[in-house]
Image: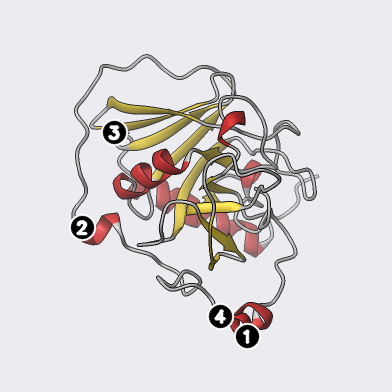
């Protein structure tokens, strides 16, 4: 029996299709689950590759699964402009704390956040689940599945990627190996695109105690550990 598609779902697919139409597939990020690597592609060429960590809990977009979703995404928000390497974020605000790599006993989100919005029905929960590309102090685990759903990177790597990935950038997470592409030269973004942050959650200064207490809790996603 035919069932009409709910209006909200129809609007979601329409927005996703419009986003695809506006994206240049020659400029994108590809993340390989099998390789545990992230490739930045510009003009159809591979310009840089970084090691990453995806979820230790497998693949998917189920609520509460802590899994890494697959498919096509856009960078919906960039958070962390001018924050120092190792800056600790809680509820997407810099707390004022800065951690060195492999700080013992600590596993927060640090340095930069690129918040992903899923463009397919199979990853439609990603934004609400707070699936990020972000820095981690647990750099010794980079290169193998170790996250709680997000894409983890070393601080230096995520800061470098942040400056070359504009808002709305196309991101693809695949289960297989990275594709073999010709090597290219890294192209810098204009300064306004490299640092543009569509968020009121990431001031250059650390949040005050009263601001941190005033922030409502986020019910989904991985804010303390991603």
In this picture, residue 146 sits left or right of residue 83: right
Q: Residue 84 falls in which quadrant of the image?
A: bottom left
Q: Residue at x 32, y 31 (%)?
A: 41
Between disc 2 and disc 3, the foreground one is: 2
The image position of residue 185, as x and y in percent, is: 19, 28
Mark 4 and mark 2 in contact? Answer it, CB < 8 Å: no
Q: Which residue is mark 1?
A: 210
Disc 1/disc 2 C-alpha distance (Å): 33 Å
Q: Residue at x 62, y 25 (%)?
A: 144
Q: Is residue 113 visible?
A: no
Between disc 1 and disc 3, the foreground one is: 1
94 and 130: which one is in front?
Answer: 94
- Residue 181: which disc? none
Q: Which residue is mark 4?
A: 208
Mark 1 and mark 3 in contact? Answer it, CB < 8 Å: no
Mark before the other along the chain sequence, 2 or 3: 3
Mark before the other along the chain sequence, 4 or 3: 3
Q: Quadrant of the N terminus?
A: top right
Q: Which residue is mark 2?
A: 191
Mark 4 and mark 3 in contact? Answer it, CB < 8 Å: no
Q: Which residue is mark 3?
A: 26
Q: Residue at x 70, y 67 (%)?
A: 218
């Amino acid at each position: 029996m035919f069932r009409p598609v709910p209006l909200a779902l129809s609007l979601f697919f329409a927005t996703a299709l419009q986003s695809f139409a506006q994206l240049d597939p020659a400029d994108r990020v590809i993340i390989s689950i099998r390789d545990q690597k992230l490739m930045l592609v510009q003009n159809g060429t591979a310009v840089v590759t970084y090691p990453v960590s995806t979820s230790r809990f497998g693949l998917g977009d189920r609520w509460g699964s802590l899994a890494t979703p697959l498919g096509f995404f856009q960078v919906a928000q960039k958070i962390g402009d001018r924050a120092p390497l190792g800056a600790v974020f809680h509820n997407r605000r810099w707390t004022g704390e800065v951690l060195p790599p492999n700080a013992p006993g600590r596993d927060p989100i640090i340095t930069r956040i690129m918040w992903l919005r899923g463009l397919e029905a199979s990853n439609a929960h990603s934004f609400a689940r707070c699936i990020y590309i972000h820095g981690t102090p647990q750099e010794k685990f980079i290169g193998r599945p170790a996250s709680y759903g997000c894409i983890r990177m070393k601080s230096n790597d995520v800061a470098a990627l942040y400056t070359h990935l504009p808002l709305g950038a196309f991101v693809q997470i695949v289960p297989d190996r990275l594709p073999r592409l010709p090597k290219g030269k890294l192209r810098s973004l204009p300064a306004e695109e490299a640092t543009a942050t569509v968020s009121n959650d990431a001031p250059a200064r650390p949040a005050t105690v009263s601001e941190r207490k005033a922030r409502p809790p986020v019910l989904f996603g991985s804010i303390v550990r991603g």
